[in-house]
Image (spheres, grey):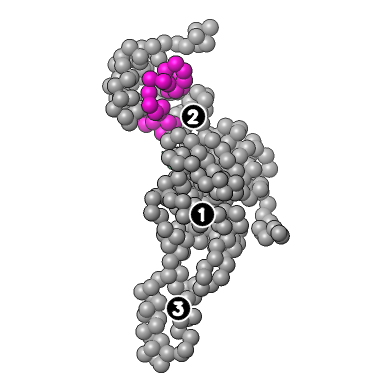
Amino acid sequence: MTDTTPATTAPFNTIDAVVQALEGAAYYADRRLATAVFLALKLQRPLLLEGEPGVGKTELAKALASALQRELLRLQCYDGLEQREALYEWNYAAQLLHMRAAEAHGASSDVESEVYQPRYLIRRPLLQALQAPAPGAVLLIDEVDRADEPFEAFLLEYLGEYQVSIPELGTVRALVPPVTILTSNRTRELNDAVKRRCLYHWLDYPERERELAIVRAQVPKAGEVLSEQVAAFVARLRSAPFASAFQRAPGIAESVEWARALIALDTVELDPEIVVDTAGILFKQRDDVAALTHELASELLKPSEEEQA
Ligand SMILES: Nc1ncnc2c1ncn2[C@@H]1O[C@H](COP(=O)(O)OP(=O)(O)OP(=O)(O)O)[C@@H](O)[C@H]1O
Ligand SMILES: [Mg+2]
């Protein structure tokens, strides 16, 4: 099999350059994620990001598009998503008008082929991404686990070869392979064949320092003490033995929102009362909100052993 992928130069020479470019787009990636992005770009392979909600999967695609100065094309997946919403559909109304006009002028015998021209094609994100002019687009296929299995099967040709077949027009190949990011919350296991065509990265909760950098960047109004307390509190809450008290740990999105809420409440420093009163921002499940008691909040606010040392 010959490699038909058009050659393009990779936009970053080093992994550090990826980290820095993403940081310039206000996205803080650790080295493992930056390595995955670097390789996806270099090898021109789709990148599948899996992880808990709110850990920055969707945001990575947005930040990467901004860092690369490429257009972001987004396909939001859901149960029942069909090819015509993802790839293309024919503009029936315009085709009909064409046929009527042709009839009125004494139709040529070739009306049928005339209506199947690219100009009657309504392009959806997957096709737009193939036809984006240089330097190409960033394509986000978001929450692919929500789409059904036939849709996943349809994605195979696309992800493997950056091409699709349109019966009336033939095969459409990418002008420039789109930088493709797929995300999944793992509500179901994806098809092995899809996974095999992608590089895989499990996006975990960030370590404390990185979360602190994100809070600082996104909530500059939060003072240093509060930002550090938020990052430390959430990090402890996600770690043993505390994590087991909750069904779902807060994501980065929740930490950022919490910092904003605390500012709105003129909080300078955390205390157990304010933690309990704002628990609905960290947790979105009733049992989890209830589990964050005054007692547990006090425990979580105590300096950890390493901080005491
Ligand atoms: N590494 C990061 N750097 C900067 N901001 C981040 C980072 N990760 C997450 N965020 C912030 O968290 C918010 C939520 O992230 P995002 O929407 O990407 O999560 P997600 O993993 O796609 O979640 P879901 O599975 O619910 O869709 C973003 O809007 C952004 O503000
Ligand atoms: Mg998302």
> Decide: marks 3, 1 in contact (CB < 8 A)?
no
Q: Is residue 75 left or right of residue 43?
A: left
The residue that appears at 37% across and 80% down in the rendered structure is 97
Circle 3: element type: helix
* Prevalent SS, magenta region: helix
Disc ID at residue 216: none
> Decide: marks 3, 2 in contact (CB < 8 A)?
no
Q: Is residue 234 left or right of residue 47?
A: left
Question: Which label lies toward us, 1 or 2?
Answer: 1
Circle 2: element type: loop
Question: For this rendering, which residue is in front, 244 or 115?
Answer: 244
Disc ID at residue 115: 3
Q: Is residue 4 above or below residue 9?
A: below
Q: Is residue 90 visible?
A: yes
Circle 1: element type: helix
Name the residue tied to disc 1.
Answer: 153
Please state the total of marks drawn on the protein image: 3
Q: Earlier in the sequence, mark 3 or mark 2?
A: 3
The residue that appears at 53% across and 72% down in the rendered structure is 169
Q: Is residue 235 left or right of residue 291?
A: right
Q: Which residue type does callout 2 highlight?
A: Tyr
Q: Is mark 3 within 8 Å of ligand 2?
A: no
Instruction: Give x and y (percent) for residue 34.
Output: 60, 37
Question: For this rendering, which residue is in front, 61 or 4?
Answer: 4
Q: Is residue 276 above or below residue 78?
A: above
Quadrant occupied by the N terminus: bottom right
Within 10 Å of the Cα at label 3, are there few (<14), some (14-19), or many (20+) other Cα atoms?
A: many
Q: Which residue type does callout 3 highlight?
A: Val
Name the residue tied to disc 2.
Answer: 205
Q: Earlier in the sequence, mark 1 or mark 2?
A: 1
The residue that appears at 55% across and 49% down in the rendered structure is 194
Q: Which residue type does callout 1 highlight?
A: Ala
